[in-house]
Amino acid sequence: MNKSDTISATLDRREAVPAVLGQHEDFLIITGLAGAAQDIAEITQEADNTFMLGGAMGGAAMMGLGLALAQPDRHVLVVTGDGDLLMSLGALATIGAQAPANLSILCIDNARYGETGNQQTHTAMGIDLTGVAKACNFTTVMNVTSQNQLPAAREALREAGPVFVLLGVTDGPSRRYRRNWDAVERKLIFRRALLGK
């Protein structure tokens, strides 16, 4: 995404994220922090197939990679923000090197660090995360900034990967959901959904 794309993004994340996600049951979902976690928690009602990170900035992509490698028969979706991903750009290189076909990343880019006070991120200054994903050999890379691209993005997330979809959204509020902050309980719920009782 270049600087002009960020500034001209017109998508409201509260509408665009569920439109791109579609049936959340198609995935095991790991989220980054702040808005991404709130979006997914509210859309899925904190379903058993979701694990939302908190206080682990930069960890979502690598956690998703580990899960994808451990569960090759399940499709893993990492939903994260630009700020979280900028904290771990090396993760994209590692994912590209490992090339897991069952891993997709949806990066919700509002050009803000929502977790730490809404400061501008580097994507507001022209840093192109889709360019980084392309350079890291992701199989499919999409930059989504308009409504008519949402159906194709939803399909892309379900393709053999690794897949990277950047969803350019305005700096409006994310969904708000009173999520369960008990990480141990959420881990056990996620584990049971994954492995059975």
Image (cartoon, grey):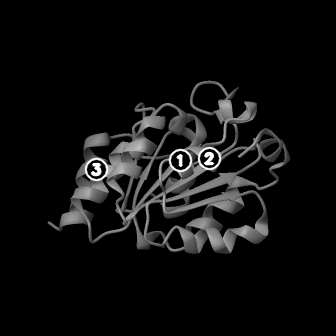
Q: Distance between the Cα atoms at labels 1 and 3?
A: 21 Å
Please determine whether, in this image, residue 110 is positioned above or below residue 114: below
Measured as percent of width and height from the top left, residue 176 is found at 60, 47
Give the numbered dot on residue 131: 2
Q: Are marks 1 and 2 in contact (CB under 8 Å)?
A: yes
Give the numbered dot on residue 126: none
Residue toward you, 67 or 56: 67
Q: Considering only order in the chain, which callout, 3 or 2, is on the residue closer to the N terminus?
A: 3
Q: What residue sits 75% from the left and 44% below the top?
A: 172
Number of the front mark, 2 or 3: 2
Query: At label 2, which amino acid type do we have?
Result: Gly
Q: What residue sits 58% from the left and 34% below the top?
A: 83
In this picture, residue 162 sits left or right of residue 108: left
Give the numbered dot on residue 66: 3
Query: At label 1, which amino acid type do we have?
Result: Ala
Q: Are marks 2 and 3 in contact (CB under 8 Å)?
A: no
Residue toward you, 40 or 68: 68
Q: Is label 3 in a helix, a strand or a loop? A: helix
Q: Distance between the Cα atoms at labels 2 and 3?
A: 23 Å
Query: At label 3, which amino acid type do we have?
Result: Gly
Number of the front mark, 1 or 3: 1
Q: How many labels sit on residues?
A: 3
Q: Which residue is mark 1?
A: 135
Q: Are marks 1 and 3 in contact (CB under 8 Å)?
A: no
In this picture, residue 4 sits left or right of residue 122: right
Q: Considering only order in the chain, which callout, 3 or 1, is on the residue closer to the N terminus?
A: 3
Measured as percent of width and height from the top left, residue 171 is found at 75, 41
Measured as percent of width and height from the top left, residue 188 is found at 23, 52
Residues packed near mark 3 inside 10 Å, few (<14), some (14 to 19) or many (20 plus): some
Please determine whether, in this image, residue 68 is positioned above or below residue 185: below
Please determine whether, in this image, residue 99 is positioned above or below residue 110: below
